[in-house]
Amino acid sequence: MNHVFHDSRNVVHYALKQMNVMKIIAFVSQENNTGKTTLAIHMAEMAVRAGKSVTLIDTDTQGGTTKWFRRRRQRDNDNLATVTAHPKTLPDLLIQSKQRKVDLVIIDTHGNSSKTANIASQVADLTYFPCRSGLLTPDRKSKTPLLSKSQKAPVFILLNFCRQSELAGITRMQMQRNAYPVLDFGISDCVAFRTSVSDGRSVLEDDPAGQATIDIKNLFSFTRKRLRF
């Protein structure tokens, strides 16, 4: 089965190389409630504001990304779309997206599904593994196969819901000592994330000068540098 997924990734990348390469980001986790959907939504909003055309692919059975998009107010010259999809259809969807000249695809996955997470991370150019700042510790390394060095594309742990910089710093230090690819910044636990997303908005609209927006801009800046887009 893994061999099939590996071949799918090769097919997708070969097809995309025949065109201008489209960038693909995946948000994956083997835990629920780690903020994948909220982060995917905000990365999409940042990219649209940067003039990119974006497709959000929602493989989460709860459909959080799709529900948010339905509430979202459409804007002039809006270049954001969502697609609800089964993970097995990702290779075809990515090729179709490139044919429509989409600049960036963001994949939101379902928690507690290593199969979905593996498929998404195999086709992505960059994978984020969000976790609560005190949740992922070195003794759980065996339970996180997505952090394997065999991954072709980079995978980064993103500390989310950070309430205390000290706690996040300790967790980050522990993971770095165990060769975890953890980002040197995190996402704050801000109420603005929950209130804005529930109403089809983003913190970029509701709290443009707040800490939540600062954190999202940091993540987007890092993403652009890694993907060079």
Image: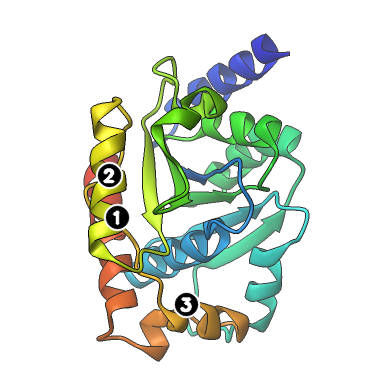
Q: Residue at x 45, y 29 (%)?
A: 139
Q: Is residue 114 left or right of residue 155?
A: right
Where 149 falls versus 162 (above or below)? above
Q: Does the residue at mark 2 contact the one at mark 1 (Cβ under 8 Å)?
A: yes
- The residue identified by callout 1 is 168
Q: Does the residue at mark 1 contact the one at mark 3 (Cβ under 8 Å)?
A: no
- The residue identified by callout 3 is 193
In this view, the residue in front, 195 or 153, is 195
Q: Residue at x 45, y 42 (%)?
A: 136
**Quarter occupied by residue 22:** top left
Q: Is residue 193 left or right of residue 32?
A: left
Residue 172 disc label: 2
Where 73 falls versus 22 (above or below)? below
Q: Using the numbered discs, state the Cα–Cα distance from disc 2 to disc 3 in whole angstroms.
A: 23 Å
Q: Residue at x 41, y 68 (%)?
A: 48
**Quarter occupied by residue 73:** bottom right
Q: Position of residue 152 (x, y in %)?
A: 41, 20
**Quarter occupied by residue 200:** bottom right
